[in-house]
Amino acid sequence: MTRVLDATPIDLGVLKREDTLPLSITCTGNSTALSAAKRAFKAHGAIRLASSPEAQWFLELHPNADGVLAVLKDAKHALWQVSLKGGSLVSTTLRACDWALELMHPGLRGIFSTEMAFVSDLGQSPGKRPKRELFWSTLFFDTVEQLTHFSALVLTPSLSPNHQKILYTSDHRSGFLDVFEYDRRSSASRLIAGYQGSNLAAVYSPKPSNGVAMALILSHHGSPMPYFADAQGKQLQCVVPAKPAAICASPSFSPDGQQVVFVSNRLGGKPQLYVQKMGSRQPPKRLLTRLSNSCLEPCWNPVTPNLIAFIAPTAGQLRIGIYDFKKSNADWVPLSLPPGHSAVEFQWCRDGRHGVYTRRSSSKQVLHLIDTLSGKDTPLTPGDFKGSTFQAALF
């Protein structure tokens, strides 16, 4: 059975009012598949695992030599089933869990088969330089692959719309920060931006148009400023007027690729969020979050265009806020953080509800999955992983 995903924007307010759906999971003869399915649904804020008597939904998994047969039933005994093939047992099981979730929650995309690029801090190279490398993994770290071996600084990964290329910033070429593009098919990197000054970050547009395929933060004309560029990192267009001089950072495109949000101190003082439309010659619009006197690291929701997540300080910690264009203000994500911990570098999952962020403390950095509605928080980085993990980019 196949199903076409509903691309209609999700009303997160409606989702927030809904109770979790009680789900019972059974699996014939394979503890690995059962464990993977239970781990996945335990991390989802819209589902709770339940025993058969109290469940309203029932997922049966039947691993076989070709893959996994999944059968889903509801309390009225309606039945759906799908046979999935290809990939490892765990990856096929997670695809089956996505299929089941999308039937139980129409309009909400599954996230369990998500893959991501991230950066891991592996200590120092023999020359005492920071050793941060680019990795690729599944959401729950079932498979992990190290992509770069530069023994240098690698930062800020961004995935292309087709998920085959990764923009990142590194000093491995010259000792200064440049922007590169890694091709997963060829396992090769090419230089995208090596302009005079610092080439600080780059992100892909989800829908390239009018010659704009990415946004970069460059300082080759003085202060770090946001620029639009084509797929080669050329044909630069400054996103904002040159005056007043300001420091800008962290661009993120709207889902339609026609706007970009970024951080700037254009008005002096603390950094704030600004939005600029493509092709506009007007000054960018400031977003008044009313949560904090400074805002960092915005990330536009890929499903619900009126929402932008960002990071802001409060009570001695950095936390995740979400700005809503419909309300013209922002609210905190209901996340409980221990003293001395902060939540940074948030990136939305493809369902527009969950996201991955870096949990940072004085001793380590690890990746967590967060449901922005319920606050359900799940550590992702395994305890035995060889380095700190941060700055995830998802698809």
Image (spheres, grey):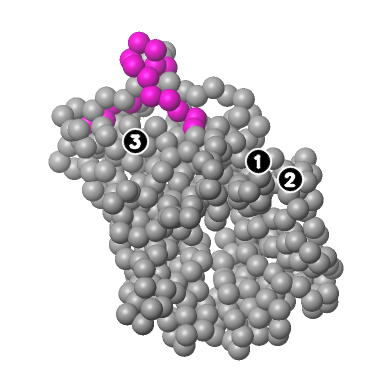
Amino acid at pointer 2: Leu
Left or right side of 15 for 93: left
Q: Give the range drawn in magenta.
A: 45-62
Crowding at mark 1 (Cα within 10 Å: few <14, some 14-19, many 20+):
some
Q: Which of marks 3 and 1 is nearer the N terminus?
A: 3
Q: Which of marks 3 and 2 is nearer the N terminus?
A: 3
Please give the count of numbered marks on the rendered protein: 3
Against 190, is 3 above or below?
Answer: above
| In the displayed structure image, the side of residue 84 where residue 152 appears, left or right | right
Residue visible at 29% across and 32% down?
70
Q: Work out whether 75 lies above or below 92.
A: above
Q: Residue 109 carries which label?
A: none
Task: Residue 291: give its label.
Answer: 2
Q: Which numbered disc covers residue 332?
A: 1
Give residue 357's position: percent from left, percent from top: 51, 50
> x%, y% of residue 392?
47, 57
Q: Does the magenta stretch include residue 271?
A: no
Mark in front: 3 vs 1: 1
Which residue is under mark 3? 39
CB of mark 1 within 8 Å of CB of mark 2?
yes
Kind of element beneath mark 2: loop
Determine the residue positioned at 44% across, 51% down. 367
Give the amino acid type for the residue marked by disc 3 in the picture.
Arg
Label 1 sits on a secondary structure element that is: strand
Residue 48 within the segment the image draws in magenta: yes
